[in-house]
Amino acid sequence: MLSSPVAKILFLDGVRGAAVVFVVTQHSGYMHDIYMGAVGVDAFFVLSSFLLTMIFMKKSIKLIAEPASYRKWGWTLADYFSKRFFRVYPLFALVAITLWLLPFEYKKRYYLVKQPEDFNLFQTLTFHPEHRHYLMWTLPLEISHYFILPAFVLVVLKMRRFWWVSFIPLYVWVIHEGLYTTRNNYYRQPLSKHLSTFLAGSMAAVIFVELEAWIKSTGFKFGTLHVIGLRVVEAVLIAAYLSVVFRGLFFNWLGLPLQPAKHYIMPFTSVKLSLLFVIEMIQPSTVSSIFEWIVLRFLGKISFSVYLLHVFVIFTPPIKEETNYYDKT
């Protein structure tokens, strides 16, 4: 039995809430050795691509079935871009304008601007690569991906029942990029450095939509063995995900401990996380129930606000200078 659309949204909102907790934890000076902030940002990217791909793909399937006119397709694309843009850009612009109005000492304190001349309002608002100060680097990448996503979905739909053929080389590329591409100087990184992360989320969404349609069309029912098999795969994915996030577990158990990183990096978690989304969407378990907790869901609803604004709290001198982390929180 597939979970209801409402349950799906609750579950994913909770994951988004957990991701923003990871980011705040990193910036508050706790658990610096495991890059919680990077893990949270990657979760944002995967979630964004997964949800948007799923929504746009389902809408595109309906338009193809009608069949819709070019005008209706145009309105659909315009609606898609406008909703995505105006959902996140106004707060981004408000924060940028507020920083511009504040004295330089506040720009330096809260968004780590090095010199007064380094902050240019117009270039910040237009996503110039040299003016993505501190937390402002993620939104330009997400908006850039918005333009690629519709093309990806339409190509997949054009391939019809052979959509899975293209996913074999794509997954090989995503895994290769994840294992061998170092993402560290994230302030000035182009979309290409994170494209594999977004693509992992989009491919997982396609897999879910195709599986959901197949289950509905065939009347397939999950038996006990099917559920056990899914739970085994899910357990392995969770263990692998936690091993990468906490830089231990499987690696230590297998006698292959990871060397301490010499600089801040973004670990490769996108494929594992996105496949976990598919499993929980198809056959929900206690895992999704945990993320449906109302506190995580609320944080998920306001996650972008928390992401951009939390530095105005934790970098305030009385809090930042507190030596005891637990007193700080």
Image (spheres, helix red, strand yellow):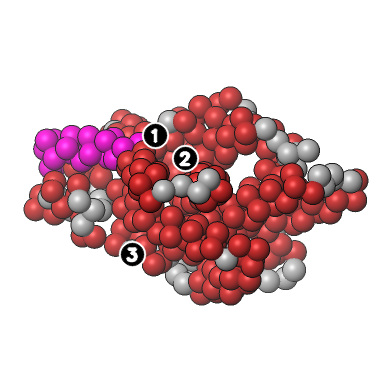
Residue type, numbered disc 3: Pro
Can you give x and y, in whole percent of width and height, for residue 40 in the image? 49, 48
Q: Earlier in the sequence, mark 2 or mark 1?
A: 2
Q: Mark 1 Cα within 10 Å, few/some/many (few <14, many 20+)? A: some
Q: Residues within 10 Å of mark 2 (few under 14, many from 20)?
A: many
Secondary structure found at label 3 = loop
For residue 20, the mark is 2
- Residue denoted by label 3: 190
Amino acid residing under circle 2: Val
- The answer to whether 109 is drawn above or below residue 205 in the figure is above
Q: Which residue is nearer to you in this view: 154 or 237? A: 154
Estimate the spatial distance between the alpha carbons at disc 3 and disc 1, rounded to whole Å: 24 Å
- For marks 3 and 2, give the CA distance: 22 Å
Taking the view exactly as shown, the residue that stands out farthest to the right is 224
Pointers 3 and 1 in contact (C-beta within 8 Å): no
Task: Measuring from the top left, give residue 115's x and y in whole percent.
Answer: 13, 53
**For numbered disc 1, what is the local secondary structure?**
helix
The residue at 50%/49% (across/down) is 67
Region in magenta: 86-105
Location of residue 19 in the rendering, given as x and y in whole percent from the top left corner? 51, 42
Between circles 3 and 1, the one closer to the viewer is 3
* Identity, as a three-letter code, of the amino acid under mark 1: Val
Please name the residue that numbered disc 1 is placed on.
306
